Image (cartoon, rainbow, N blue to C red):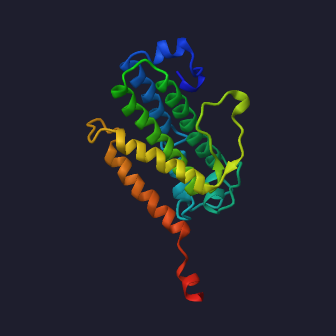
Amino acid sequence: YEIAQCLVGSEMCIRDRFSTVENAKQALMGCYGYMSADNAYGQAWQEVTFGYCGFGWSQTNGSSTDLLVSMDGGIDETINTMAWRGMYKVIGETNAFIANIADSPLESADKLPMEAAARFLRALAYYNLAVTYGDVPLKTTPSAHDGVAVPRSPKNEVFELVRTDWEFAYENLPEKDDDGFATKWAAKAYLGKLYHTCLLYTSPSPRDTERS
């Protein structure tokens, strides 16, 4: 069941998927599941990040992996396409989850940790995209089929959303989870990673410092 197919504000959707804590948790599990799919952390995203380091493939046979490692893949290269779509699938599902959990009749004490988990995942997807591809389309609301295409947003705007999502996650996630799901300390760690990333992008290089 894809949450993005559920109309935001639909009484049937909220009744069926978000009327009980257990049902809402199952919908949240779907968001986690898309992050582990083969077009995300299950395969493609690992290959993109490892491939771009230049040491991930030894064959020069014109394959998708060869093109990726050779920095000659282009936007239509298979692994790039898989990874891009995988992260945006996570974003689409978490956008829908966040909107629907807000309209659900559940208690705030139940809703906030689940919204925090969804925002943690959304921030992770956007962080990955911005670090790898720079300026990327930024959308935080559920998309109808005719509202999916949006222009790229500056990378600093994407990082700002990532920051607010991870700060929300830090404030509302539990301190501990025995099943391996996101905790407030995971959000805190990723905030540190974000701040380090932003410092790298904004600080002058040693060569620039020498020239000045």
Question: Can the viewer see residue 182?
Answer: no
- Percent x, y for residue 16? 48, 13
Numbered disc total: 0
- Percent x, y for residue 144? 67, 27
154 to 82, vertically: above or below = below
In the image, 166 versus 179, the foreground residue is 166
What residue appears at the point 60 percent right and 34 percent down from the top-left corner? 141
188 to 177, vertically: above or below = below
Furthest residue toward bottom: 211
Residue 70 occupies which quadrant of the picture?
A: bottom right
In the image, 77 versus 128, the foreground residue is 128
- Percent x, y for residue 87? 56, 42
- Percent x, y for residue 69? 60, 60
Residue 195 lies left or right of residue 93; in this view the side is: left
What residue appears at the point 53 percent right and 15 percent down from the top-left corner? 13
Residue 9 occupies which quadrant of the picture?
A: top right
147 to 82, vertically: above or below = above
Q: Say which quadrant the C terminus sits in.
A: bottom right
Question: Can the viewer see residue 71?
Answer: yes
